[in-house]
Amino acid sequence: MPVLGCSLLAFMLSGCTPNTSDSPATPASSAMATPGAAPAPTTSATPSAAPQKAAFTIPSDCHNLVNAATYSAVFAGTPLNDPRVVNPGEAGPLQPKTAPSGVTPEVVLASATQLRCVWRDPGADVTYLEATVATVDPAVASTYLDALAAQGYTCKQANGGRQCQLVAPNTQYPVDDAHTVLLRDTVYIYVGQSNFKTTNLMGSIATTIWG
């Protein structure tokens, strides 16, 4: 599995107007106070509620990471999580783990993985695509994306969050390797691929997760 940052491998996250009335103002001469009456209570505008983060759902099955049409067009015929490629228990739906203290943000993000999908033919030398999804601490993920930008990744606002990507020639074969990450709210997505053509796959994954 390519690992960003170490061996390889968008973000993420009013003034109050006075109340008005359609009724005409009461003339000062007619607004006589009643002796002993308590003063009228004053009112104030309720502060606007903080905007809610968009709801999301992380699929529990790699086949549901994108819609059926995209899956058929991109992955049809490519083995998924083949045991000759990835060890059982290291792909598919995963239980997030607590990372040890003092480890790098990269390790923290990897420990939080909830779904890992690897499409690769065991007989292929280089052709593959891997996707991982996790819910994370946005501050940790943002720090990691900052480090990627310093390593030459191109970062921009895309798919509702901060997205960073690096495309570089493979060191052994005449093909390109691509690594793309997206941080949106508390969700972190990684897609790594080599000699595996896709068109806006990250956008398709984001549509599945956020709708």
Image (tube, helix red, strand yellow):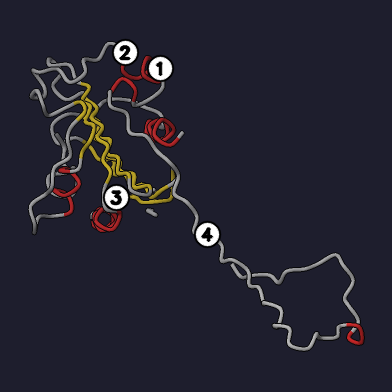
The image position of residue 25, as x and y in percent, is 87, 75
Give amino acid for label 2: Ala
For marks 2 and 3, the one nearer the N-term is 2
Give the percent coordinates (x, y) of residue 17: 68, 70
In the image, residue 172 above or below residue 37: above
Q: Which residue is located at x 34 percent, y 26 percent? A: 65
Which dot, 1 or 3, sits closer to the camera? 1
Within 10 Å of disc 3 (Cα), the crowding (few <14, some 14-19, many 20+) is many
Residue 192 vs residue 151, the one in the foreground: 192
Residue position for label 3 = 153
Which x, y percent locates residue 150?
25, 58
Task: Name the residue rendered at 23%, 27% in the picture.
Answer: 117
Earlier residue among tags 2 and 1: 1
Which of label 4 and label 1 is nearer to you? 4
Q: Are marks 4 and 3 in contact (CB under 8 Å)?
A: no
Q: Which mark is residue 11?
A: none
Q: Is residue 91 left or right of residue 205?
A: left
- Taking depth in this image into account, of 143 and 200 the one nearest to the observer is 143
How packed mark 2 is, by other alpha carbons closer than 10 Å (few <14, some 14-19, many 20 or more), is few
**Callout 4 environment at 10 Å: few (<14), some (14 to 19), or many (20+)?**
few
Question: Could you say which disc has been placed on residue 76 in the image?
Answer: 2
First in sequence: mark 4 vs mark 1: 4
Q: Earlier in the sequence, mark 4 or mark 3?
A: 4
Secondary structure under tag 4 reads loop
C-alpha distance separating marks 4 and 2: 46 Å
Residue at the spot of label 1: 68
Hey, what amino acid is under mark 1? Ala
In whole angstroms, how far apart are the C-alphas of marks 2 and 3? Answer: 30 Å
Depicted 176 relative to depicted 122: above or below: below
Q: Which residue is mark 4?
A: 49
Indicate which disc, 4 or 2, sits on the residue closer to the N terminus. Answer: 4
The amino acid beneath tag 4 is Ala
